[in-house]
Amino acid sequence: MQGYFRKNLWFVKNLRLRKISTLLIFLMSLKNLNPNPLDQNHLCGLYGDTLLSKEGYFTLSWDCKINLLQEKNNIVLESSIDSTFANPHAVLELSRYVHNSLSITGKTKGDYYYRIFDHSEKKALSNIFFVKVRPHSMAMALGYFFAGLFLFIILIGIIIVQYRKHTKGEEPCRN
Amino acid sequence: MILLAVFSVLWIFLGWYWGKDSKDLDDFMLGGRNVGVAMGVATAMATWVTSNTTMVAPQLAYQLGIWGMLGYSLGSIGLILFAPLAVRIKKLIPNGHTSGDFMRLRYGKIAWRTFLVISLFYSIGWLVSLGMAAGVLLESLSGIPYEIGLTVILSVCVAYTMLGGLKAVIGTDFIQTIIIVAGVSALGWYAIDTLSLETVYQKVSERNSALLNLAMPAGIMFLFNNLFFGVGEIFHSNVWWSRSFAFSNKTAFRSFSLAGIFWAPIPIAAGFIAFVAFPLEIGIPQADSVGPLVASFLLAKTGSILVFIIVFSSLASSLDSLLAATSDLILTDIYHKHMRPNATKTELRKKVPYVIIILGLVTYALCLPRLSNLAQLLHFTGAFVASTIWPIVFGLFFKKANPKAATWAMILGSGFGLLGYFAIGFYTAALISAAVSLLVTLIGYLRNKVDFQFENLKEKEI
């Protein structure tokens, strides 16, 4: 946090402002905590912006100790619904990918495992990153939906009725 | 680089050209209070098509699927519902300059100051997100460093807003609307033409089936939340109030309602582009970059140029409007009403350029560190702006709307909205805020025994 502060908010001289800015940034960063920094046992560290997604989307990121991904072919980001990767699915061929993060989306309820795998040498290059997708309950979603609908009907009702009442007998303003 | 230079020179020239006769404060701030329908529709549309529409609409379609795309287009409801409010505003406050004028005269100083805090927080948050988007987009599409892209776009917008005021903003908005609508339509059409709808559907349903599921809980929750976020943004913001004052009596209703109707398909066209990422197997590093990345991939160099032109236009059309409206709010509600109550119109007119420059510099300073989480700050504002909806609607139509309740509605609505933001998700903040705010406003209305006289809103001209 302090390093980030020194790097990006050096221009804030006032102590109280500094504290407020730091607190604000900390609060804003809570949702982006990096739960799994570079793994010491692997060449690459694989991590994500959340361990539990209620929306079915999340972002995976990776750091490699050397510029491995550009030097080798057949390095793939794989996903599986079990931790043994018995039936893995290739998400992305990393040797042709210039970024070090990937936005994953549209996932239904379930457990998802990810790893970076070298198919030439048949070995995993990263730790396994595990994310749970547990959508909100349908009852909760419908509760919000109907609450929103109710508020919307009230809003439209008030505006239409009051607008008509207050412009009654006047020349229509829309002409 | 050449394209950037051409557009920069064009906007500044047009700003100077349209604003060269704006000597009077009303001319500069409110375009002489006589803007016609065509310009009215164009400026409302262009302002509402922000970098958020061209970047966040695809992002929401990418993350929340069909509901994300449709939910974003519900932002048009805010514009449509503002049409009758604009007529009422013009009738009640014919000499008004800002949304702050209404809050001050209708609810008194405490509610007014609470409102100013919310409105300025929202405006700065929006300005910073636009400035950052400018830098990030130029960097990702053309390789121009973030700081240079940010500096150029912000300087251009500050320059032509300062030179021409609202007339320049509305004039450039007209051209920018044509560019945005044509560009987004061309991109959407090309995407459908290249990959059939069937292919897109098949690929999305293979591994990202939740996006096509109409029973997706987060998507369902997002729908009305986004509607109330949009309504809150429009109902409270001086960007829209200044347009109400600027439009002639006969054009306000038609301008806002038509702009809303024409705007609605734009997020759907922009959002659809996100679905194309799946059949094309494009890796998306961050969800908010899905639109530009797909466009560049689909149309190669032409795509990058097209996206650049669309986004530059949408950024400029919102940045200029926001700079103009926020500087009006600062000049009228803070400088004039708090610091120099005896200032004349001529004096205030002379201060306008300084306020715009200072606002531009503040935005620049906040954008420069490139705080990645400032995009979240914009979602944050949903809780604040939605809390202002009911105090404004009740205040415009009901004599018994209560000043104390209006203040508490804004404070408690914002508080509970923020709670929802952290405890549940960004897609609940505005809805919770609006619900709490309605409850408080309604209690205040039922308990109030004093009738407000709407004649009191007709303040003398400065």
Image: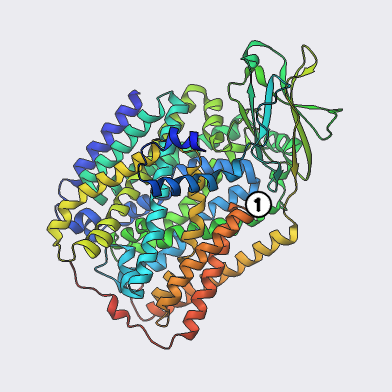
SS for callout 1: helix
Quadrant (top left, top right, bottom left, bottom right) of the N terminus of chain B: top left
Residue B246 point in image, percent of width and height: 28, 59
Q: Which residue is drawn at 20% across and 44% down?
A: B163
Given the current orientation, which residue lies at the most extreme front position? A15
Q: Residue at x 69, y 64 (%)?
A: A143
* Residue B342 located left or right of residue A134: left
- Asked whether residue B318 appears in the rendered view, the answer is yes
Q: Residues within 10 Å of mark 1 (few under 14, many from 20)?
A: many
Residue B281 point in image, percent of width and height: 66, 27
* Residue B363 located left or right of residue A153: left
* Residue A28 located left or right of residue A86: left
Quadrant (top left, top right, bottom left, bottom right) of the C terminus of chain B: bottom left
B130 or B168: nearer the viewer: B130
Q: Residue at x 36, y 74 (%)?
A: B107
Given the current orientation, which residue lies at the most extreme bottom position? B449
- Asked whether residue B53 appears in the rendered view, the answer is no
The subunit letter for the residue under badge 1 reads B
B214 or B286: nearer the viewer: B286
Residue B235 point in image, percent of width and height: 42, 62
Count the labels in the image: 1
Disc 1: which residue: B219
Which color scheme did the rendering employ for the protein?
rainbow
Residue A50 point in image, percent of width and height: 67, 41
In the image, residue A97 sits, relative to residue B117, either above or below, namely: above
B262 or B216: nearer the viewer: B216
Three-letter code for the amino acid on which mark 1 is drawn: Gly
Q: Which residue is drawn at 33% across and 56% down?
A: B37
Q: Quadrant of residue B97?
A: bottom left
* Residue B364 located left or right of residue B224: left
